[in-house]
Image: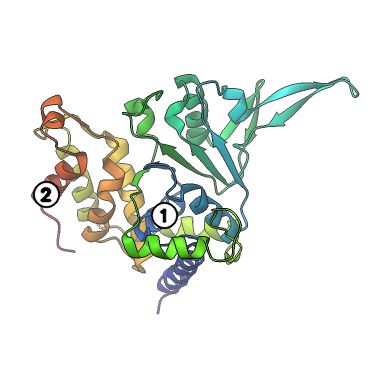
């Protein structure tokens, strides 16, 4: 067995251990856990859409605890200022000096709750940090510790008092993860666990153990980034993204960043599956989460009840996959 295959096998084991630990806190929602891990291994950020109360905060806390990372949560509101997110300078009367007070973005895992409730200026402050991986306060730059994952939640746009994220800002998220209600059996398990001799209504993460270090996560990111990828796979990913630009029913298609994101996520998916190379199935698996927030449907299609996932399913069926 080559050294590369041994590294991939060990990485696959470590990722499975991470999944198991997160599963100690999260009941069900396996696809959400998988996609969040894919985002982490691909060094990206995720936009999570779903109604409140489905365990988004618990998910990020469980990941942070399992790798002994620092967790922060910001509740976005219409009056939230950019400095409330990034930090600011303050004057200390005793020392008669200005000091930098670091904001909640100085962490490994940031839950940006209800990001579309904040105005554009505050949204942009967070998105700039996500892109640049650093914060500038009063002209001084501070590099963020790695790994750094932002999990931003978004309410359905129909809800009152929301500010939709512009397409250019949505494009900065690697994945758009849909989180739905648990099925009946999972909900029964959840209710049983919460109401079994515990005060309050919170699921705890006390059973989640630290099994990986932040340094190991960086190693896994490097392993994923170097997985083999055939030229036909690259061509397949680009063909899928380019198809979104002139597909009937799509007014705005995905740009080149969509192609790059699709390949990054596919490499992480391959590592999650224990493969040392990327397959067409890896591309198909991650394509909906990578592309659904990068497309804008025409008004006619939206009126007819089409969804981006349905359109993407048609595109994937019509783009012939390579045989590798």
Residue nearest the viewer, comparing 102 with 259:
102
Disc 1: which residue: 225
Residue 263 picture location, percent across and down: 31, 49
Mark 2 closeness class: few <14, some 14–19, many ≥20 residues within 10 Å: few
Using the image as rendered, state which of residue 318 and residue 82 is in the foreground. Answer: 82
Total of numbered circles in the picture?
A: 2
Q: Would you say residue 27 is visible in this rendering?
A: yes
User: Image check: 271 left or right of 23?
Assistant: left
Give the Cα separation between the discs numbered 1 and 2.
Answer: 25 Å
Estimate the x, y position of residue 319 in percent, counting from the top left.
11, 49
What residue occupies the far right of the structure in this picture? 94
Neighbours of disc 1 within 10 Å: few (<14), some (14-19), many (20+): some
Does 263 sit above or below residue 3?
Answer: above
**For mark 2, what is the residue?**
319
Tell me if residue 271 can be seen.
no
> Are the residues tagged 1 and 2 within 8 Å (C-beta)?
no
Residue positioned 34% across, 34% down in the render: 156
Name above or below for residue 181 compared with residue 189. above
**Residue at (63%, 39%) from the top-left corner?**
106
Does dot 2 land on a helix, a strand or a loop?
loop
């Amino acid at each position: 067995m080559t050294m590369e295959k041994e590294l991939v096998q060990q990485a696959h084991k470590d990722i499975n251990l991470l999944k198991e630990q997160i599963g100690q806190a999260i009941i069900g929602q396996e696809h959400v856990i998988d996609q969040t891990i894919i985002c982490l291994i691909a060094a990206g950020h995720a936009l999570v859409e779903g109604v409140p109360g489905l365990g988004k905060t618990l998910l990020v806390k469980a990941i942070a605890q399992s790798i002994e990372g620092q967790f922060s949560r910001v509740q976005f509101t219409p009056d939230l200022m950019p400095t409330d997110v990034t930090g600011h300078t303050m004057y200390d009367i005793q020392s008669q000096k200005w000091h930098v007070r670091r904001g909640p973005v100085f962490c490994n895992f940031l839950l940006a709750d209800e990001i579309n409730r904040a105005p554009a200026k505050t949204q942009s402050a967070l998105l700039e940090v996500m892109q640049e991986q650093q914060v500038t306060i009063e002209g001084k730059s501070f590099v963020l510790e790695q790994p750094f994952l932002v999990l931003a939640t978004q309410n359905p746009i129909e809800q009152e008092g929301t500010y939709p994220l512009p397409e250019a800002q949505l494009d900065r998220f690697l994945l758009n993860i849909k989180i739905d209600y648990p099925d009946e059996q999972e909900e029964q398990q959840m209710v049983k666990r919460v109401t079994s001799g515990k005060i309050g209504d919170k699921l705890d993460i006390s059973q989640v153990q630290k099994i990986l270090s932040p340094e190991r996560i960086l190693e896994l990111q490097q392993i994923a980034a170097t997985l083999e990828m055939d030229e036909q796979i690259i061509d397949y990913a680009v063909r899928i993204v380019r198809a979104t630009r002139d597909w009937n029913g799509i007014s705005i298609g995905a740009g080149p960043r969509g192609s790059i994101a699709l390949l990054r996520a596919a490499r992480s998916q391959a590592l999650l599956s224990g493969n040392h190379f990327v397959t067409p199935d890896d591309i198909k698996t991650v394509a909906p989460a990578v592309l659904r927030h990068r497309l804008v449907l025409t008004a006619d299609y939206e009126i007819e009840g089409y969804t981006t996932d349905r359109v993407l399913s048609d595109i994937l069926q019509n783009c012939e996959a390579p045989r590798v």
